[in-house]
Image (spheres, helix red, strand yellow):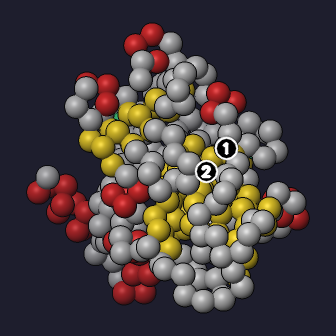
Amino acid sequence: MRGGGRTAWRACRVPALAVSLALLAGCGDGRGDPPARPDAGHQTGSCVTATGVLVADLDGDGTTDRVSSSYTGADLTVTFGAGGGRGTEVGPRDLVGDRGEDAEDVVAVVADFDRDGWNDLFIAATDAFSGDSPIEPAVSEVRLGPFSARGRGQSDHHVDLTEPRAAAVADYDHDRYPDLAAYGHAGDGVYATTARLGGAQGLDRTSDDTNGKYLKEAEQTDRQTPAYMPKADLKTFYPTCTGTTGED
Ligand SMILES: [Ca+2]
Ligand SMILES: [Ca+2]
Ligand SMILES: [Ca+2]
């Protein structure tokens, strides 16, 4: 571990003008180095069990990892190295990094948003409600896989969302790319579920005419927990597990 720490430290010694870029890349925010990207021929073999558990190699180390389903993304459980029976279990607060660790809400979902064969992490961290204007989240980004048990992926990409409080994997446009549904405060106590569509770049970053048509305002104001979240059938995106990997 000491060697890995020195490597990370060296990787973060950058000229002052590049510091902000390094921070944007996740360097120095407690998440360490990204997992090595395996060879192109490496088989990821993602599948979903009968009870909706995603079975995949998330960090590219050749061991099987598991992702439990979660209604709002707050209680997402990711178990790295579960194949051997003694996995490392982490949740959104373990994955978010220093920028979001003190936030009121931390939510995360896992899906292969860019369909490159590696599952990606979307994670958001948002401070406590503070009035009529929606607050900007401390973290709202898709981290392209493979990603580590500390939430460090190959690259981070900011996703523009206002005050996200819940997240789920959705299937809005049925194009085989998984989509993100994010529930959050739109202002003046109005909450809404917004769509960010998956695609070759990961997720689309901002509202536009394409994803805007899926926006759905909550029926009640001041409701920080969604009464309903869109939820994709993961079998749309992954084959059903067979054999021992299908056991929950
Ligand atoms: Ca693994
Ligand atoms: Ca991916
Ligand atoms: Ca889609």
Residue 108 vertical position relative to residue 178 in the rendered view, above or below: below
Residue 170 vertical position relative to residue 225 in the rendered view, above or below: above
Check residue 136 in the rendering and tell me which mark sits there, or answer none: none
Q: Which residue is mark 2?
A: 168
Residue 129 vertical position relative to residue 110 in the rendered view, above or below: below
Residue beneath the point at 55% across and 87% down:
130
Q: Amino acid at mark 1?
A: Lys
Q: Is residue 174 left or right of residue 152?
A: right
Label 1 vs 2, first from the N-terminus: 2
Residue beneath the point at 70% across and 48% down:
230
Corner quadrant of residue 220:
bottom right
For this orientation, the residue located farthest to the top is 243
Residue beneath the point at 52% across and 53% down:
73
- Position of residue 225 measured from the top left corner of the image (x, y, whole percent): 59, 63
Q: Is residue 146 visible from the viewing direction of this image?
A: yes
User: Is label 1 in contact with label 2 (beta carbons under 8 Å)?
Assistant: yes
Q: Is residue 179 visible from the viewing direction of this image?
A: no
Residue beneath the point at 45% across and 38% down:
67
Q: Is residue 124 left or right of residue 192?
A: left
Q: Give the CA separation, mark 1 to mark 2.
A: 6 Å
Corner quadrant of residue 82:
top left
- Nearest the camera: 103 or 58? 103
For this orientation, the residue located farthest to the front is 220
Check residue 231 in the rendering and tell me which mark sits there, or answer none: 1
